[in-house]
Image: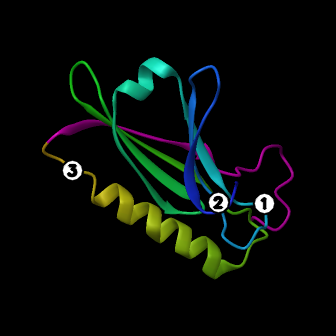
């Protein structure tokens, strides 16, 4: 059930849109859960890759775009991180300007917390 991109409708009406790896490894995946009312406002959703999805919704004043992403940790290979940031930039660049004035980027950005900056000087 949790391979590729799909949606899951909970018995209570919430909908989870997700994009996972196709190789069966359950890591680096991303999802977005909408309640029943918000889901009625959904115009479209697009799985970009297993780390990024985009959803467009109707809003009272404008159309809303949500970009949900899961960023690799600092320990990941440079090409994996570069690919994610490149794809994220591409997604943000191609958001329709004519009908979207609200864009929200959310996700697990794997930021480092704390004061130990060893290796990051």
Instruction: Verify whether residue 6 appears in magenta.
Output: no
Give the structural element (helix, strand or loop) at label 2.
Answer: loop
Q: Report the Cα–Cα distance between label 1 and label 2.
A: 7 Å
Q: Report the Cα–Cα distance between label 1 and label 3.
A: 32 Å
Q: Left or right: where does residue 18 sit relative to residue 105?
A: right
Residue 97 lies, in percent from the top left, at 18, 47
Nearest the viewer among 45 and 89 is 45
Residue 60 lies, in percent from the top left, at 24, 18
Q: Left or right: where does residue 37 sit relative to residue 115?
A: left
> Residue 20 shows which numbered tag?
2
Specify which label sits upstream in the sequence, 3 or 2.
2
Q: Mark 1 points at which residue?
A: 26
Q: Mark 3 points at which residue?
A: 96
Give the structural element (helix, strand or loop) at label 3.
Answer: loop
Residue 115 lies, in percent from the top left, at 83, 46
Residue occupying image coordinates x 27% and y 52%:
95
Task: Assess whether mark 2 and mark 1 are in contact (beta carbons under 8 angstroms).
Answer: yes
Quarter placement of the C terminus:
bottom right
Up-down relation of residue 114 to residue 110 (above or below): above
Q: Report the Cα–Cα distance between label 3 and label 2.
A: 25 Å
Specify which label sits upstream in the sequence, 1 or 3.
1
Specify which label sits upstream in the sequence, 1 or 2.
2
> Residue 115 shows which numbered tag?
none
Give the structural element (helix, strand or loop) at label 1.
Answer: loop
Magenta span of residues: 99-121
């Amino acid at each position: 059930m949790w391979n590729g991109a799909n949606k899951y409708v909970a018995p209570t009406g919430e909908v989870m849109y997700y994009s996972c790896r196709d190789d069966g490894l359950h890591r680096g995946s991303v999802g977005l859960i909408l309640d029943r009312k918000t889901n009625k406002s959904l115009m479209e959703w697009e799985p970009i890759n297993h780390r990024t999805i985009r959803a467009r919704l109707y809003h009272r004043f404008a159309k809303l775009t949500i970009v949900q992403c899961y960023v690799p940790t600092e320990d990941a290979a440079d090409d994996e991180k570069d690919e994610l940031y490149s794809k994220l930039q591409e997604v943000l660049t191609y958001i329709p300007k004519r009908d979207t004035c609200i864009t929200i980027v959310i996700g697990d950005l794997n930021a480092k917390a704390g004061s130990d900056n060893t290796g990051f000087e």
